[in-house]
Image (cartoon, rainbow, N blue to C red):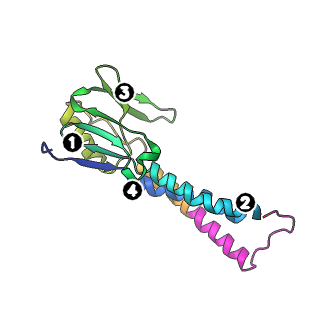
Amino acid sequence: MPEQSQERFQLSPLIRATLVSVYLALVVPLPLMAPPTLELILWIAAPLGLALVLAMLSEQVQVDSNGIKVGHPRWCSWLLRRGWQLQWDEISRLVPVGTSQGGTVYYLTTADMQQQLLPQRLENFDRFLAIVQQRTGINTTSIRRLTPPWTYRLLFSLAIIMLVTETAVVVAVNNGLISIPEGYPG
């Protein structure tokens, strides 16, 4: 990596699309099923929630000759105010930690025991690891993505099925193909 170059890594598009589709599948039906007194509030809250989800999914990792920086772009950094940065020469090792789901996360650890979570859900993850290894001298060849891509593909497919089914039900109700019981509050 040339001395002055900077590279930016974002969340994997597969993960981003999956989480947005799950949000939509869970939230879009709410205003459609809500009592009339809550419909407007839910129609206003749904896009606000989507904006918040998109902000959280916009986290990015920047690496350059000096170090690594994790944060959000300007459009949402004022809201989320999360992030961290380390200089390459501060990083002394990677510490693996098992998760309750059976995976392994890694912490970049400094000599003074400061720890930051190594991002593992990035696009071009192999390139990112190669830069970390090149700049720190720490072997990263055994590090894998936190969750295999097939799990996100399955979740994405299920969310799309939910959205299609929910849309079909709404269309059927609106066209009188399905009737709602009279006592139903919605």
Position of 39 relative to 78 (above/below):
below
Distance from Cα at disc 2 to Cα at disc 3: 44 Å
* Amino acid tagged 1: Asp
**Residue underneath mark 1:** 64
The image position of residue 92, as x and y in percent, is 26, 24
Give the amino acid at mark 2. Leu
Extreme residue toward the bottom, this view:
175
Q: Which mark is residue 38?
A: 2
Q: Given contact means CB atoms under 8 Å apart, are the residues at marks 2 and 3 in contact?
A: no
Q: Quadrant of residue 43?
A: bottom right
Nearer to us of marks 2 and 1 is 2
Tell me, yes or no, whether the highlighted magenta stretch contains residue 173: yes
Residue appearing at x 76%, y 79% in the figure: 176
State the extent of the magenta-drawn residues as a range.
161-185
Circle 2 SS class: helix
Q: In 3D space, how far apart are the residues under numbered discs 4 and 2 (Cα atoms)?
A: 33 Å
- Given this view, does label 1 or label 4 mark the residue nearer the observer? 1
Q: Earlier in the sequence, mark 2 or mark 3?
A: 2
Alpha-carbon distance for marks 2 and 1?
Answer: 49 Å
Mark 1 packing: few (<14 Cα in 10 Å), some, or many (20+)?
A: some
Q: Secondary structure at mark 4?
A: helix
Image marks 4 and 3: residues in contact by CB distance under 8 Å: no
Q: Earlier in the sequence, mark 3 or mark 1?
A: 1
Work out which quarter of the rendered image holds the N terminus and state it. top left
How crowded is the residue under tag 3: few (<14 C-alpha within 10 Å), some, or many (20+)? some
Residue at far front of view: 78
**Which mark is on residue 13?**
4
The residue at which mark 3 appears reads as: 115
